[in-house]
Image (tube, rainbow, N blue to C red):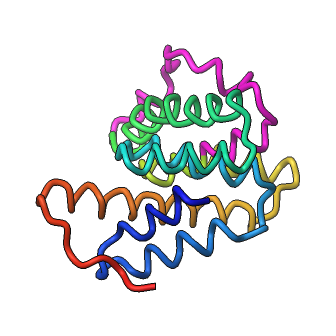
């Protein structure tokens, strides 16, 4: 996973914890490989920092994730970018009338993602955590738990989302500041 090691090494010294967390998540075996890499890819697309998206996709391909599965992880990020905004807004609006209205937005990929449903739902959990949508988190976690997915798997997806988000924001901040900064020590 040279691309992810380069990504971890690119993080400044003040983000050493993020780099160490990234490395440990890559090495974890709590999720099957395609499911784990899909969480990384979907999370990277949810934040959309180019260097992180490129590194995650390269690492996922290197780990054997198919192009179809990578496309499905991108699809999870895309559909949740839409759904998280819509459904999160419903939780913020005091007038409950809007909860009674049909959403009237297309979301066919959720029912036919082209990968195992547990994988896709876990990727949707990761993206929904990044976007902060309680309704989508509850819906996808409920579906996963209903199919027997253990809490530790869901927690791992949340950890991947958190670390991917943090690495993305740090690198975007560094780029915005035009700083190279001290790189982390191994």
| Position of residue 176 in the picture relative to residue 142 (left or right) | left
Taking the spot 56% from the left edge, 60% from the top edge, the residue there is 2
Residue 166's place in the image compared with 132, above or below, is: below
**185 or 40, which lies in front?**
185
Residue 104 among those drawn in magenta: yes
Q: Residue at x 11, y 60 (%)?
A: 177
Q: Give the image location of residue 8, x and y in percent.
A: 45, 68
Q: Position of residue 157 (x, y in %)?
A: 63, 59
Front in this rendered view, residue 12 or 77:
12
| Quarter residue 172 falls in | bottom left
- Residue 55 locus on image (x, y percent): 49, 50
Counting from the top left corner in percent of width and height, residue 60 is at: 64, 47
Q: Which residues are magenta?
A: 95-124
**Horizontally, is 129 left or right of 71 in the view?**
left
Tally of numbered tags: 0
In the image, what residue occupies the spot 50% across and 14% down? 104
Is residue 166 or residue 141 the one in the foreground? 166
């Amino acid at each position: 996973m040279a691309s992810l090691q380069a990504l971890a090494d690119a993080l400044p010294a003040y983000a050493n914890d993020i780099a160490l967390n990234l490395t440990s998540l890559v090495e974890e075996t709590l999720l099957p490989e395609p499911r784990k890499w899909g969480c990384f890819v979907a999370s990277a697309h949810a934040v959309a920092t180019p260097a992180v998206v490129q590194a995650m996709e390269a690492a996922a391909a290197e780990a054997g994730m198919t192009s179809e599965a990578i496309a499905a992880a991108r699809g999870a990020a895309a559909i949740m970018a839409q759904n998280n905004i819509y459904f999160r807004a419903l939780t913020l609006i005091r007038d409950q009338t809007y909860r009674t209205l049909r959403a009237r937005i297309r979301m066919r990929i959720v029912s036919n993602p082209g990968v195992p449903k547990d994988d896709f739902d876990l990727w949707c959990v990761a993206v929904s955590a990044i976007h902060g949508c309680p309704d989508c988190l509850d819906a996808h976690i409920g579906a996963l738990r209903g199919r027997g997915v253990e809490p530790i798997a869901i927690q791992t997806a949340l950890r991947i989302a958190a670390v991917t988000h943090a690495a993305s924001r740090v690198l975007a901040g560094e780029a915005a500041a035009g700083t190279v900064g001290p790189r982390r020590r191994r």
